[in-house]
Image (spheres, coloured by chain):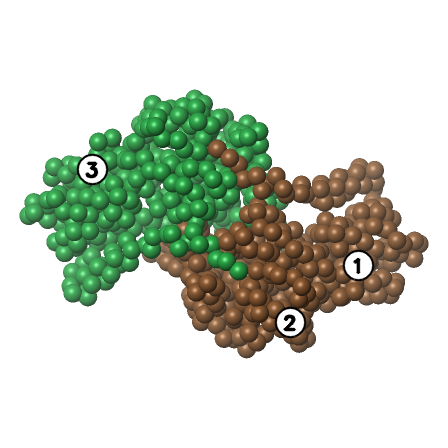
Chain colours: A green, B brown
Amino acid sequence: MNINRNFLALCPSYLFTEVGARIASFREKHPERELIRLSVGDVTLPLAPAVIRAMQRAVLEMGDAATFKGYCPETCYGYEVLTEAIRARYARRGVKLSAGEIFVSDGAKSDLSGILDIFSCDNTVLVPDPVYPVYADTNIMAGRRIVYADANGGNGFLPLPDERVQADIIYICSPNNPTGAAYGYDGLKAWVDYALRRNAVILYDAAYEAFIDGDLPHSVFEVEGARGCAIEICSFSKTAGFTGVRCGYTVIPDTLEREGVSLSGLWIRRQSTKFNGVSYITQMGAAAAFGEEGERQTAENIAYYKRNAAAIAALLGANGIWYTGGRHSPYIWMRCPGGMNSLQFFGALLEGAGVAGTPGYGFGKNGEGYLRLTAFASAEDTAKACTRMGDFLKRI
Amino acid sequence: MNINRNFLALCPSYLFTEVGARIASFREKHPERELIRLSVGDVTLPLAPAVIRAMQRAVLEMGDAATFKGYCPETCYGYEVLTEAIRARYARRGVKLSAGEIFVSDGAKSDLSGILDIFSCDNTVLVPDPVYPVYADTNIMAGRRIVYADANGGNGFLPLPDERVQADIIYICSPNNPTGAAYGYDGLKAWVDYALRRNAVILYDAAYEAFIDGDLPHSVFEVEGARGCAIEICSFSKTAGFTGVRCGYTVIPDTLEREGVSLSGLWIRRQSTKFNGVSYITQMGAAAAFGEEGERQTAENIAYYKRNAAAIAALLGANGIWYTGGRHSPYIWMRCPGGMNSLQFFGALLEGAGVAGTPGYGFGKNGEGYLRLTAFASAEDTAKACTRMGDFLKRI
């Protein structure tokens, strides 16, 4: 009996232990001071009324034999009312999908790991640095070789393909966690062309697409050629506040093949074997989130967070701090001033302003020297934090 | 870029295609005849009123900023109200668990595949035959070697350990799907001792434990020594009718190690990386299912299904048909009469009685010559089916 020794190669998550310990210490030393956390990547506004109504109705249906729902008839795909709502949303962006290309799940995190099952462990994975740690960790668990694409101030944290690098599975998260940077059409096209030349597959994490304004692509499938190389993974978590409800969807073009094998065919087999569908109640809520009223209401919540992000960005700009994000994202990625490394600055900001961010070193070597701030706190707390940060930045 | 070629080793699921095609053909040829399906492994009775109330309350909380819930704070474990309810349920069976040994998930199917991530692919897996196809398929996808333990009429479909067989991961499903057979203490003790001697791990699927009456173990942890070799995977699907709600829990003793590594430690890392928790609404419903009122109400539904099972079993017994299951299970596993193989008998029963079962060959070579009947239809339909089957059995 052997355990999976790849797990021993995982880095322990020192980041959150360290951050948690310092925050606990702050609270102990300064019980009278109010700590404002701009560190949490979780939504705070309640679900849209249209979503609540749909879920209430679904709950009642589950209590009545005549309307009770057991297993979702289409385990891999989800209920048609939801997949059709997703399809319509893509159509509004000019992306035409077939019904059989959309697969509802309990969230992007589950799909980001599940999708790896259909690929051999001897593929090379390309991951940006800094990055959401899950992309690397899921591949370390499988024993795959990982190469990193450097994201930094020089490229605005939007790395472009390096012809010297061979990769089979390419992660792109745009708008990005942790940096908030978002690719334009040309940048994504460069990656699509690179993937097509190498017969690689792009795993496109679109978890934050609802925060985009202006003319950036929301979906990788808006890019010519993407149907030949991309799988898109989306989430209701940030779009509709579903972090505690759990729903997402993965889009795999039905013509996408590698080695002559349909990737959606492999996904269907994987999901049929390892997954048993999403709650009926959740799916009805998700369908309502993408209905006319739901989209309007969830857009108001997104706008609220974006106003917070804009306030934080404005504060940094006014104080000459270099940053990215803050516009198409709930995240602002700031360069630590005063030559401090990310943990030092995190501590200084905590002590000096009573504001907690997330030190960038936890997201990779290129995160060193940066701090992530999030826009999910209340507008009042965000404004208060901005005032305090402004005072603090002037003092250092 | 290589796909996972292990997927090409999977058998296509001819069973459900074949069964579906024959049922569709029957409906086309005999639109006037009423088909009764005793083939579906899905619940039909609505959720308990206590569960509905808890979920309604949770939905409303999600619509209010003051009570809104984002990510479950303890992603891997679940909300305390639920884990404590699970712990209390085990305590009532005399099994003492610590809070940190219970891990809530979106269902047994997800956990049955997820748990394999913590084990090396070079382990040998022991699976009973016949069996729920997922145990073998998830391991075929990973490229593990699989050996089968023969379950048959000779051992009452309750195979005992074979000392000549070396295995590292051992699947036990008791009460069993598809046979409904359930181990007593001695049978489970034999498997626990076997696993301890070989340093193996038992994956114990307790999805149907709520159907047990009398003095059989409900949990593998009622067996002496099991904490040294077993992981138990449970589900609210059949226990509380949650097939369309999605909730389960896995129990890993905190002292369970292999190669000096804590298995629950590996599971925590796996879940933290590949999973993002269960819906707040679902968890509150699940906690209510295990509360006093919820347990009473869900027990009534279980009793309803058990009465159906008893009726089917009685009908078979009265007609001299050998069967197992039907007592501690919603499944009855009958030997096909008249020397017919399972697909032949399935077809004959369909044509002759308008009743659909599930041909045993789909569950493995030892399923040939057997048919699975399920107790989830309405009491009226079950009674009608029994009458028709009785007439049919007398004619052949």
Q: Are marks 3 and 2 on the same chain?
A: no
Secondary structure beneath disc 2?
helix
Q: CA distance from mark 3 to mark 2?
A: 64 Å
Q: Is residue A359 above or below residue B328?
A: above
The residue beneath circle 1 is B334
Secondary structure beneath disc 3?
strand
Secondary structure beneath disc 1?
strand
Q: Residue at x 67, y 63 (%)?
A: B164
Residue A332: x percent and y percent?
24, 41
The residue beneath circle 2 is B190
A166 lies left or right of A156: right
Residue A220: x percent and y percent?
41, 29
User: What type is the residue that disc 2 sits on?
Assistant: Ala
User: What type is the residue that disc 1 sits on?
Assistant: Met
User: What type is the residue that disc 3 sits on?
Assistant: Tyr
**The residue marked by circle 1 belongs to what chain?**
B
- The reply to whether residue A236 is in sight is no
The residue beneath circle 3 is A323
